[in-house]
Amino acid sequence: MTNNQFSAGLKAGTSIAIGYFPVALTFGLLAKTAGLSIIEATAMSIFVYAGAAQYMSLSLITLGIDPLLIVMNTFVVNIRHFLMTASLNEKMQPARKWVKAIYAFGITDESFTVLATGKKGKIPTAFAFGVTLIAYGSWVIFTVIGHIIGANLPQFLQAAMSIALYAMFIGLLVPSMKGNRKVVMLAALGAVIHCILYFTEALSTGWSILVATLASSILVEIVYSRRGKTAESMFIREEEV
Amino acid sequence: MGPSYWWMLLGMALVTYIPRMIPLAVLDGKELPPVVSGVLRNIPYAVLGALIFPAILFVQEGNILFGVLGAGAAFLIAILGGGVMSVVLGTIAVLAVYSLFM
């Protein structure tokens, strides 16, 4: 049973592994260009495991920025995961704290969205391990390969594959949108607010995703709880009549 | 890179891991107020919207059409009922053909 859930997790995480392939490959390549040894580059993918923050750190290293500032930047870029694991906690099967602390390491934008949209009901722990492991493995292995071969994929394939993670997000979102106006509103509002924050340059990327997500989730919840109440009071009135 | 690289890596690892771990380890088994858990249940869908847009438009620098085409293909395949894997591979295929011939 547990084994089945683990394999199901590996399978559900395969689209993440495909999506990480070009991104991690390019990270390995850029790390080499930035002067990182293969050990240093791979260690970053093994211990930090955060795509956007790793990319940013490379350009900051090249610019000779103070390491402390790079750490602070990493924190800002990754703070959004706090929101994701808080949300995920509501859906996860109960487990010992140290077990949850292990798979927590593997929660990225991609593994979170695969886990949170995947199953009706509680998510089994073994499933979470499957999803996070295949994603993490792909990230680390393709970092190594990118550093070793030190070259991009053929141009047409590199360009085409850079869409993979976004296509995955769309593939996860659309089935939940069908027949569910609340999901449509949440996604649309999250997208619109993020676009506004992005184009007005009001906030840096890390904060803008977090603010857009939180604002959309709260606003839609307010709309729906009001609607719930009006429907309820109408129902009561009808009953009184 | 010198030893300062490894200290930086340790710092980056900690500030990345702690926000991921705290809610799962600390909130475990706690009953949250219904409003809070309602908001938390909304997060996956709101974050998907924010992760897709506007970033998908910029996957190829200086060519928004590329992103628009990719987004269109992905939504179309997904709406037609393709699974996540078909959406991913189908969209890559569409864009690969596009970049080969454009």
Image (spheres, coloured by chain):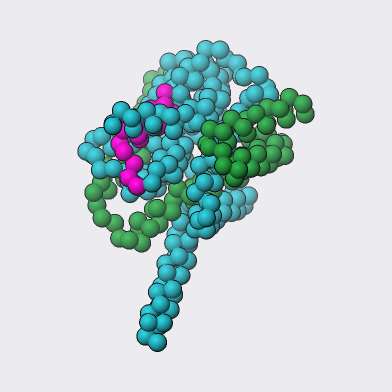
Q: The green chain is which one?
A: B
In which quarter of the view is residue B4 placed? top left
Q: Tell me what residue is drawn at x 63 percent, y 25 percent.
A: A158
Can see residue B31?
Answer: yes
Q: Give whichever of B61, A85 is nearer the camera.
A: A85
Position of residue A160 measured from the top left corner of the image (x, y, whole percent): 64, 29
Query: What secondary structure is the magenta-colored segment mainly?
Result: helix
In the image, A142: left or right of B11?
right
Position of residue A224 measured from the top left corner of the image (x, y, whole percent): 45, 65
Q: Which residue of the protein is positioned furthest toward the top in this rendering?
A: A148
In which quadrant is the N terminus of chain A drawn?
Answer: top left
Residue A55 falls within the magenta-colored stretch: no
Q: Give the range drawn in magenta.
A: A121-137
Position of residue A143 measured from the top left corner of the image (x, y, whole percent): 49, 20
Can see residue A112?
Answer: no
Chain A appears what colour?
Answer: cyan
Q: Which residue of the protein is positioned furthest toward the right in this rendering?
A: B102
In which quadrant is the C terminus of chain A drawn?
Answer: bottom left
Q: Tell me what residue is drawn at x 39 percent, y 31 percent.
A: A8
Q: Tell me what residue is drawn at x 47 percent, y 66 percent.
A: A223
